[in-house]
Image (cartoon, helix red, strand yellow):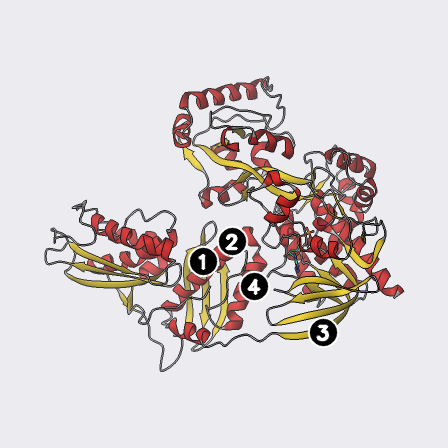
Amino acid sequence: MKRQYLKGLIALILLVAITFGTSALGEFTKKDKNADNGQGANMEDAAGEYKPGTYTYEAIGFGGPVTVELTVGEKGGVTNVVITGNSETPDVGGKAIPTLAEQILKAQSAEVDGVSGASVTSGAVKEAAGKAFAEASGQEVVDIPKPEGNNLFVPGTYSGSAKGFGGDINVTVTLSENKIEDIKIEGDHETENIGSFAVNMLGDKILEAQSPEVDALSGATVTSNGIIRALNSALVLAGADLTRFAAEEAEGGEKIMKYEDLDCDIVIIGAGGAGMTAAITATQAGKKVILLEKMPYVGGNTTKATGGMNAAETHYQKEQGIEDTVEQFVEDTMKGGHDINNRDLVTIMAKNSASAIDWLDSIGAPLPKVSFSGGATNKRIHAPEDGSGVGAFLVTRFLNKVEELGIQVMYNTKATNLITLDGKVTGVMAEGPDAYYNIHAKATILATGGFGNNQSMIVKYRDDLLGTVTTSAPGITGDGIRMAEAVGADLVDIEQIQLHPTVEQATSMLITESVRGDGAILVNQEGKRFINELLTRDVVSAGELKQTGSYAYIIFDQRLRDGLKAIEKYVSTGITVQADTIEGLAEQLEIDPATLADTLKTWNQYVADKKDPDFGRDTGMDADLSVAPYYAIKIAPGIHHTMGGVKINTEAQVIDTEGNPIPGLFAAGEVCGGVHGGNRIGGNAVADIVVFGRVASDSAVKYCDEQ
Ligand code: ADP
């Protein structure tokens, strides 16, 4: 998004306000006059305690600066509030501005409710109004420094903050006279959302452009815009005139695309878990690799994996006295997949899982914590030592290794077609930000992930899922399946799409299974349980779809929140409803309070008896739900994993509709079908990408050597 800034930035600013944020402003703006005459933004001069005059302040809104002009009459009351914000989205922030002016005038204070749905604009208006009220109250103000001569900044280190995806983002910049020397971006929820490398990548883009006028990362626009707003606040403190950055941008001419031919041994499409595993392995085997990634960051759906990686007969299991076998791993996976999986592929995954764990050790990505996970007979799921999510952990380590090995990663470069010659795949056509490429390669590996984020493909194979939200990353649109089909590839199990039963629909945020595992229950709009909450994902999802409105509420208490870190993110994102009593919770959910109270009482008794006569639940019953406050999140099923895809054999060669391997074409990860059958069990997505990423690489390396 391009932003145009108004000329004439604030001349004065409250240092204390910027340092401590808007909450600090409240302390010296709270007047609470209750002067409500209902006249909107023009009213008589009621008796007040402000200094007469006009006070104008500015803060950074959604699209640019928002200005608040406050007029205080002779008697000390606020008589007029004028807000301008020409850069705000007309239908959102723009619409909110008159309401905000009215609220401020009515309250005679900056402490107003704001307008829901326009929180960024509301926040900026409240911030600017807070400063105006503060000055009108005689609070101390300091001059914003003015850069010398034509310099951009007053050198120093400055910080700014803004709202991001699930909390505050803080940006600290170190500036010399005309250069952004360093930038530090902090925001826990953002890194959980898109990965710390993505956040850092935006920092790098800002340093490279030497400007806040950079494009948001696609798929992470909320975070990106938060970072840019926080940066702008910091730059304003350094005396920067933001219009100077916007002007440079506007002068840019129309882009002319180049055409380029590139050569390598192996081209890999998609830098998720499977693609990066294959790229590292092939490079270690001495091949020149080009890794294409259509997004501005790596990771795909792999980043989102929270559990761990299933592996059997590993050295970690042996060291921890855990007995497990490859055969049992195969049987569990077949049973979990309703026995429609390709047993040969499952066997390859299970057999090679222990050596995949050793390989992860060797590249600095150990997964030593072994525990139980749904569908596994033995303790088999391997996770990072520090309890962090396996996906983000692995993606960061993979990227470190990719960079250490000097592998060429082409970001923002989308593969569009496979190149074929005499029935062989000989490379890829791709489109980057500045050029179209023909990338010629001896072997090509598809690692583009599934198609969970492509509604038309979902509906093509499963029209019953029309309109269902997805937890998939934005780049997961089935490109690899489409490209493979175009060169004759066969597809398997394509209609096998896994729904996850606990997805918050407005944010597509997945509520981790651990919430139910730790004791939460599901109730319908009638306030009643309807299923054993810990049955498999497909069964619980189907159960929800039969309820009124096809949704449910997941209910938990403070004890459960205290024991599960993930819940903090749900609370800070604003998707939880909370009350001190069950009845209070019920009222907010518009459920009959007596019914919900009765459901909880009955459930707590079942927990005490360790027996659920209604639905036969026998796990996740270690503690009842009795510690206030109580919480609820409205959830429904969301598309989580596409189990079907391109047909491969045990060497990860792509198979055509006649049953023959397509020479030069290999595939690994969620783009393939057959490994998970009708239902993927937790921990097998990561096993799949690491094992088959290595298999695809080994086969491609061998194929290159034979050419
Ligand atoms: P897997 O789990 O199989 O490794 P991921 O979802 O983790 O799959 O990663 C797939 C990656 O492929 C994502 O980063 C996605 O953006 C990328 N991708 C998808 N389609 C293309 C394409 N046409 N060109 C380049 N990259 C692509």
How far apart are the alpha carbons under marks 3 and 2?
Answer: 37 Å
Residue that badge 3 annotates: 261
Q: Which amino acid does the dot numbered 3 rest on?
A: Asp
**Badge 3 or badge 2: first in the primary sequence:** 2
How far apart are the alpha carbons under marks 1 and 4?
Answer: 14 Å
Q: Which amino acid does the dot numbered 4 rest on?
A: Met
Residue that badge 4 annotates: 201
Residue that badge 1 annotates: 226
Q: Position of residue 135 (x, y in %)?
A: 22, 61
The residue sitting at the bottom extreme is 149
**Badge 1 or badge 4: first in the primary sequence:** 4
How far apart are the alpha carbons under marks 2 and 1?
Answer: 10 Å
Give 410 or 648, whichever is nearer the viewer.
648
Residue that badge 2 annotates: 190
Q: Position of residue 407 (x, y in %)?
A: 71, 66
**Badge 2 or badge 1: first in the primary sequence:** 2
Q: Residue at x 34, y 69 (%)?
A: 6
Q: Residue at x 16, y 46 (%)?
A: 37
